[in-house]
């Protein structure tokens, strides 16, 4: 492929007139996404989709138009000022509207998309959010049924439950750094069938190793249809540990804070695959610099909610003390 940045194409000869064609690819994309699922296996579930005034308002209804589930769309008007709430479903505060609507209409599932709809978070029939790791585990099982023994990637901030589930389903798990560019490259290099991130990115080899929120949504709805269980029950085997979610810190010197924290926990096993990961036995944490913002991001997991809250306070207080 020509590298346009280094080797630009020659200019058109003087007087030559180019041609332009307008092509609407929406229907073709919708057919592509639907080709990943067995539509006959899907039940007429009721789904609520909060598309947050982003591109999901265009794409998601087009995909669902050919599927059995009914769709209730929130904030479907495309508006880049995002007047209703920020289009970041990783932040639980941005799930309030979809949770409320799921309760109001008795929906089977809630879907919350980000601005460009490459990410999606899920809410169960009791209006409780699922972590990105739980969704990745559910989707990994569906992929491994089709491709037994396949390789599945997961990032360094995902729950330790995820590699457990991959192994139980007969797959091979490989831990990676956070970031969709890195994961796409590693999928292509390793031949991985699927990859999941805690942030709601889900990648399928047959989708050119790319992430798609709406593809993940229809794949999970097929899984929910086949299970014949409410999502609140289907998720139970995967809710093995208590997680903090992603906690962000603004610090002047992220590297210095990270190294000081590593010294504080030097008696515990550590790795530097992506930032700092410390394994304290029945709890662990990952602290890494953001790839896109001037922040340190903390993800922590423990055996119980009480232990998670206690350890989160411990690490959060340490970070604040080290950065002051």
Image (tube, rainbow, N blue to C red):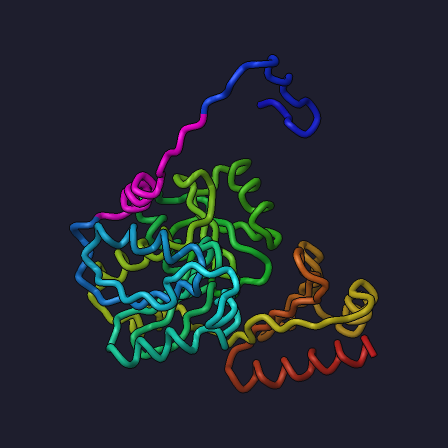
Residue 27 in the magenta stretch? The answer is yes
**Viewer-closest of 127 and 41:** 127
Determine the residue positioned at 46% across, 68% down: 131
- Judged left or right of residue 158, residue 127 is left
- Judged left or right of residue 207, residue 275 is right
Where is the N terminus found, in terms of image quarters?
top right
Determine the residue positioned at 57% across, 53% down: 175
**Viewer-closest of 35 and 139:** 35
Determine the residue positioned at 41% across, 73% down: 129
For the question of whether residue 296 can be seen, the reply is yes
Q: Position of residue 318 (x, y in %)?
A: 75, 79
Q: Position of residue 102 (x, y in %)?
A: 31, 76
Classify residue 121 by image quadrant. Answer: bottom left
Vertical placement of 138 versus 322: above or below? above
What's the magenta region? 20-38
For the question of whether residue 163 can be seen, the reply is no
- Judged left or right of residue 30, residue 166 is right
Determine the residue positioned at 71% across, 69% down: 268
Q: Position of residue 21 (x, y in %)?
A: 41, 29
Where is the C terminus found, in terms of image quarters?
bottom right
Vertical placement of 108 versus 31: above or below? below
**Viewer-closest of 266 and 54:** 54
- Judged left or right of residue 21, residue 251 is right
Residue 99 in the magenta stretch? The answer is no
**Viewer-closest of 149 and 250:** 250
Q: Position of residue 108 (x, y in %)?
A: 26, 70
Vertical placement of 48 versus 149: above or below? below
Q: Residue furthest front?
A: 15
């Amino acid at each position: 492929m020509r590298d346009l940045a280094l080797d630009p194409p020659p200019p058109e000869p003087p007087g030559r007139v180019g041609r332009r064609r307008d092509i609407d690819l929406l229907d073709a994309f919708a057919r592509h996404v639907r080709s990943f699922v067995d539509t006959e296996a899907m039940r007429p579930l009721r789904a609520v989709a909060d598309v947050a005034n982003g591109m999901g308002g265009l794409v998601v209804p087009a995909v669902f138009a050919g599927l059995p589930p009914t769709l209730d769309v929130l904030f479907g008007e495309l508006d880049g000022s995002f007047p209703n709430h920020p289009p970041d479903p990783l932040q639980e505060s941005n799930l309030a509207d979809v949770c409320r609507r799921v309760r109001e209409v008795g929906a089977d599932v809630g879907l919350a998309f980000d601005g460009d709809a490459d990410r999606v978070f899920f809410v169960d029939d009791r209006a409780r959010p699922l972590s990105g790791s739980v969704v990745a585990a559910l989707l990994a099982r569906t992929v491994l049924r089709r491709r037994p023994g396949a390789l599945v990637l997961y990032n360094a901030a995902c729950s330790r439950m995820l590699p457990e589930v991959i192994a139980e389903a007969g797959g091979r798990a490989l831990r990676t750094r956070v970031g969709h560019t890195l994961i796409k490259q590693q999928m292509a290099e390793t031949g991985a069938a699927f990859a999941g991130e805690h942030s709601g990115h889900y990648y399928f080899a047959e989708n050119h190793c790319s992430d798609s929120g709406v593809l993940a949504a229809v794949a999970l709805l097929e899984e929910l249809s086949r299970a014949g269980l409410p999502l609140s029950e289907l998720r139970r085997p995967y809710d093995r540990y208590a997680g903090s979610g992603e906690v962000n810190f603004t610090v002047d010197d992220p590297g210095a804070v990270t190294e000081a924290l590593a010294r504080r926990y030097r008696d515990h096993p550590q790795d530097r695959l992506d930032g700092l990961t410390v394994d304290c036995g029945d709890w662990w944490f990952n602290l890494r610099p953001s790839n896109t913002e001037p922040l340190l991001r903390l993800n922590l997991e423990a055996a119980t909610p009480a232990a998670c809250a206690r350890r989160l306070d411990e690490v959060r207080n340490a970070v604040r003390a080290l950065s002051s």
